[in-house]
Amino acid sequence: MSYTVLEDKVTLSGPSSSSAEVYFHGATVTSWCDISGTERLYLSPTAVLDGSAPIRGGIPVCWPQFGPGPRWPKQHGFARRMRWTLDEAAMSPASPTAVLLLRDTSDTRAGYPGEFELRLTVGLGKEGELEVEFSVCNRSEVEDMTFSTALHSYFAVEDVGKVAVRAGLKGGKYRDNTDGNVEKVEEKDEILVLGEVDRAYIGTNDEAELRLPNGKSVVLEKVGLPELVVWNPAVDKTAALPDMPDDDWKKFICLEPAMIDPALTLPKGESYTGRIILSVKDS
Ligand code: BG6
């Protein structure tokens, strides 16, 4: 059980065969292998890893806005486009945990006025579960700070047509981004990917389950992230992505714990924390 610091990333080795990898670029978790050593996150084989673009796959951090939003001209904000630093003082050599930090710079303040410290803590638990905690401190002594966020998790699957999402969504509302963000009511217990899916479910349960055809489920627990975005781009939208092979939409589904609408206004000097825990169980 340890961590190793490399030039571009930190790797974690946890109980049994569990492991994880976090790039400094965007503080993007790019790999999580569960206790059996099975990779559970999707990373595009053509993902750009040199820092010139957000990493396509893993768990990019969307902040200070989710989507195209009004506060920053870049889709999903700037946190996933910047190099974070490792806070080794907050880490213990014998623990499989990494702590990454990002503070405001003159560049960020040119587009977003906040004085902030972001902290992403990534760890492997006793059963090889992945724990990701995202906190935002508003360092300003005078200004409140408004943001939306998501932990944009890409889950690896063998065939997206054979998985189902169960999260108690039936009867709940969602905004359908494939239909002008019109608000709709979910009619089904299970969400299947039968074509492009791009939905933000509102006020969701704290647990979602991704049921795999082999009798296993990946369980996503979330705290402080009330919405759940379900995204798969299907054929046409994938063809427009420069950093994903055309057929790879079959190999992942995104379940993105989020806080989008309303955005959070964080008073001066205060902090926000959102957290996810990913584990695997028998369905
Ligand atoms: C999802 C959005 O969160 O991210 C989609 O709901 C978007 O609309 C997708 O296409 C990918 O965004 P990007 O900026 O990483 O290509």
Image: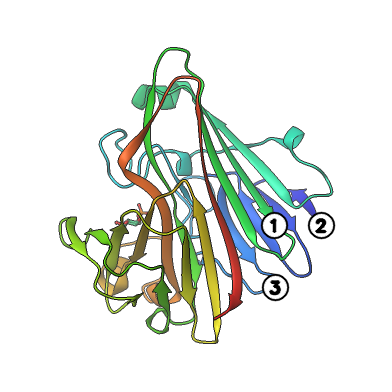
Quarter assignment of residue 110:
top left
Residue at mark 2: 1
Q: Residues within 10 Å of mark 3 (few under 14, many from 20)?
A: few
Sequence order check, earlier mark of 3 and 1:
3
Instruction: Indicate if the residue with disc 2 has its beta carbon within 8 Å of ligand 1.
Output: no
Residues marked 3 and 1 touching at CB (< 8 Å)? no
Q: Nearer the viewer, residue 154 or 56?
A: 154
Sequence order check, earlier mark of 3 and 2:
2
Residue at mark 1: 124
**How many callouts does the rendering have?**
3
In what quadrant does ligand 1 lie?
bottom left
Viewer can see residue 46: no
Q: Residues within 10 Å of mark 1 (few under 14, many from 20)?
A: many
Three-letter amino acid code at the position of disc 2: Met
Q: Quadrant of the N terminus?
A: bottom right
Q: Position of residue 20 (x, y in %)?
A: 66, 59
Q: Nearer the viewer, residue 143 or 76?
A: 143
Which dot, 3 or 1, sits closer to the camera? 1
Three-letter amino acid code at the position of disc 3: Gly
Residue at mark 3: 37
